[in-house]
Amino acid sequence: MDKKDFNILGLKIGALSEKKDISLVTGYNSYVQKIESILKTQKGEIPYYQNFGVDYYDYIFDNSISKILFESKAKNIISYFIKEAQEVLVRTTYYDNTVVKLSVDLTFNKQLKNQKIKCFIEVPLQ
């Protein structure tokens, strides 16, 4: 079998097709998967990618971080990693010390025909 390359969050990953280790996700689901990967990673969790992820624990446990600041940081990190999104809107719909629930809206540029994506992400904090 021939070798295929997959692009996951900007990282090229090679996979032999007979192994079927990685399934190819396209369209709407690929963006939901990217958003989930970004939002479910604590900032600094990946040693070689220190700026990837979101500071949930600072938001939940540090009263000096406002909801608006947290949502703005989440928006900025999504915009950075999903460059084809023209507009990003992040809203916190619920949080406590065990879970954060977010609503994310993406509007894409004209190359992607001004499509819009709305997804709801639940991030466990344990």
Image (spheres, rainbow, N blue to C red):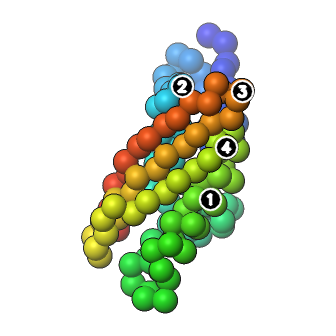
Kindly report the distance in space between the C-alpha atoms of the residues bearing marks 4 and 3.
10 Å
Question: Disc 2 or disc 1, which is closer to the eye?
Answer: 1
Disc 4 + disc 3, Cβ < 8 Å: no
Question: Disc 1 or disc 4, which is closer to the eye?
Answer: 4
In the picture of the structure, the residue carrying the numbered disc 3 is 111
Q: Nearer the viewer, residue 116 or 22?
A: 116
Position in image of residue 20 (x %, y %)? 49, 23
Mark 1 residue element: helix
Amino acid type indicated by mark 1 = Ile
Position in image of residue 22 (x %, y %)? 51, 29
Task: Find residue 77 and name its label.
Answer: 1
Question: Disc 2 or disc 3, which is closer to the eye?
Answer: 3
**Residue at the (66%, 21%) spot, across then down:** 4
Mark 2 residue element: loop
Can residue 13 be seen here? The reply is: no
Position in image of residue 1 (x %, y %)? 62, 10
Label 1 neighbourhood size at 10 Å, few (<14), some (14-19), many (20+)? some
Q: In the rendered view, would you say 108 is above or below 125?
A: above
Kindly report the distance in space between the C-alpha atoms of the residues bearing marks 2 and 4.
19 Å
Question: Disc 1 or disc 3, which is closer to the eye?
Answer: 3
Question: Disc 2 or disc 4, which is closer to the eye?
Answer: 4
